[in-house]
Image (tube, rainbow, N blue to C red):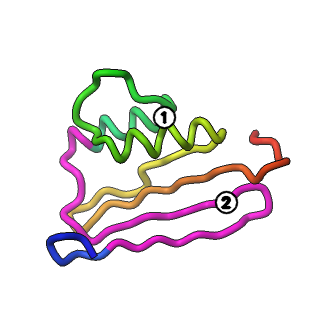
Amino acid sequence: HTPRGGQVRIDAHLDGTSMRWSVSDSGPGLASDLAERIAAACSEGLVQPGTPGIGLGFALILANAQALSGRVQLIANTPSGAQFALSVPIAGTTRR
């Protein structure tokens, strides 16, 4: 549960070449400027040092995903919550 009584849901599945997680919550969603910064960080695959406003937790997730040749995506951002996807290749497979 989130501090304000919302819920967080984490789903995981193996698709043969990677492990995939989906993380969603029932919170208020992300402010539009924050969602834009997070989407840009996801598509660029990095967080610029000293860039404020995307949160330490997200920066750590993105850095670890990158270190594991993985990918993080902002899937949905609505007033009823946000959803992220994390995909990491299984050891011994090649990411394309």
Q: Which residues are magenta?
A: 8-34
| Magenta stretch contains residue 24 | yes
> Residue shown at 43%/56% (left/top)?
84
Dot 1: element: helix
Q: Give the x, y percent position of residue 63.
A: 49, 36
> Residue shown at 22%/67% (left/top)?
27
Lower sequence index among marks 1 and 2: 2
Q: Give the x, y percent position of residue 2.
A: 24, 70
Q: Find the distance from the CA under tag 1 to the CA under tag 2.
A: 19 Å
Q: Which residue is mark 1?
A: 43
Asked if marks 1 and 2 touch (Cβ < 8 Å), the reply is: no
Residue 78 is left or right of residue 31, and the answer is right
Q: Amino acid at mark 2?
A: Met
Residue 31 is left or right of residue 84, and the answer is left
> Residue shown at 44%/64% (left/top)?
23
Tell me which corner region of the image, top left, top right, bottom left or bottom right, holds residue 34: top left
Dot 2: element: strand
Q: Which residue is mark 2?
A: 19
Q: Amino acid at mark 1?
A: Ser
Q: Quadrant of the C terminus?
A: top right
